[in-house]
Amino acid sequence: LGQSAADGLKFILKEDFVPKGADKWLFTLAPMAAVVPAFIAWAVIPWGGSIEISEPIVLFGNEIVSTGKALVAVADLNIGLVYLLAVAGVGVYGVILGGWASNSKYSFLGGMRASASMISYEIPMGTAILSILLIAGSLQPSVIVEEQAANGWFIFYQPVAAILFFVCILAEANRAPFDNAEAEQELVGGFHTEYSAMRFAMFFLGEYTHMVVSSAFFVVLFLGGYHLAIPFLPAEVPGLHLLSPEATGLLAAIAKTKVFMVKVILIVCFMMLIRWTLPRIRFDQVMKLAWNTLIPIGILQVVATSLMVFFDLAEMSITGMGVMFLMNLALFVLIMALLGPGTMSSTRNRRIPLAGSRFNPLPGERVVTGPVDPVASADLMDHKTASASTVH
């Protein structure tokens, strides 16, 4: 746990370097533009449900909270999901500004990759959210959580949308296997190659905060938010009443916040597991995955959900959950049939013809790939027998 504090202290003490030719103002603004949107996205996350205020809270002679129910969040916006999408979209501007203002080709390519990824993966993310809104009927995060408390988690109603949304938040946060904007093997460090000290730390603070916010977003949409009242769990389990929307005491708010945070931590740990497990995919494959696979799947998901809602088959009940789950299962089988097993075969690694290379020599050119020095080509058991004059 002290490693983060040690890293922060290290970044504070490091030299803050601005490369020659960089746009100083934009170079300084970019880390702020990356970290601020990640923090203000917390405002609409309903961490602990509602709490009953019996007496008004007064600060410096001004009443800041009146009596009644108060949401355990900064703001209870009726367009909370739109706010979250808007803030998440703004965060990528910090990456683009950092890549352009650094006056480095590596950084610029990283910024361009981040912008292309954001444009591409915002579309399937929007379709996944729209699939939830069609059955929830509200853009307000607290209402979506209450609907799941009464009728079951939306991950059982829309498992395909949940998978689609999770892939998109990985790409939006520049997490592996979609971290092409900072691919060390290709771009040295990507958009933050020229950054040091706290400017560099702010980029990573924004990225990790975005991971936590997107995980909280996933918990709100698909994992029931702050409660555990899923249909398969009996209602008489001790302590479960504290996690219902009707419980508005301080103890209930603390219990709900703990449950919410545990769910978020589990999602973050799963993101870390993916980073340790899967290799980075090529940038052209990242784009093809979005435009050739995820966007069509998202459109099919929205159309299928719209038909289910139109024919009154997507009702919020155990029966409706079963019908929606079967619809998603049929949709998954259809997607696999349309994609086929050889979908990615056209994007496999292959040698690109390059005039003058060892695989494509120019006419009349003799390519020698082995060593030409006799000492290098000899199989010497004792390297001391090689004379000093033959060692170059």
Image: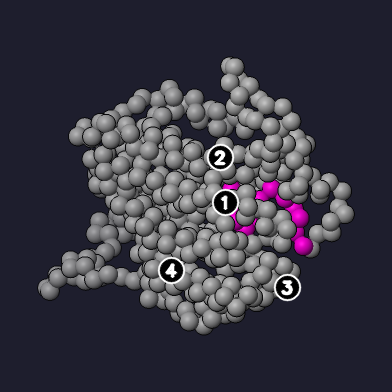
Q: What residue range appears in magenta?
A: 215-231
Q: In which quarter of the image is the N terminus?
A: top right
Local SS, label 2: loop
Amino acid at circle 1: Gln
Crowding at dot 4, Cα within 10 Å, few <14 / some 14-19 / many 20+, comes out as: many
Crowding at dot 3, Cα within 10 Å, few <14 / some 14-19 / many 20+, comes out as: few
- Residue 243, given in percent of the width and then of the height, sits at 76, 47
Foreground: disc 1 or disc 4: 1
Q: Quadrant of the C terminus?
A: top left
Q: Are marks 1 and 2 in contact (CB under 8 Å)?
A: no
Amino acid at circle 2: Ala
Q: Residue 202 carries which label?
A: none
Q: Which residue is drawn at 54% across and 58% down?
A: 166
Tell me the residue that label 1 is attached to. 140
Tell me the residue that label 3 is attached to. 319
Q: Do the residues labelled 1 and 4 touch (CB within 8 Å)?
A: no
Amino acid at circle 4: Ile
Work out how far the residue at label 1 is from the one at label 3, CA to CA, in angstroms. Answer: 25 Å
Tell me the residue that label 4 is attached to. 295
Tell me the residue that label 2 is attached to. 75
Q: Which of marks 1 and 2 is nearer the N terminus?
A: 2
User: Magenta stretch containing residue 289, yes or no?
Assistant: no
Crowding at dot 1, Cα within 10 Å, few <14 / some 14-19 / many 20+, comes out as: many
- Residue 216, given in percent of the width and then of the height, sits at 59, 48
Foreground: disc 1 or disc 3: 1
Q: Do the residues labelled 3 and 2 touch (CB within 8 Å)?
A: no
Specify the farthest residue to the left.
Answer: 364
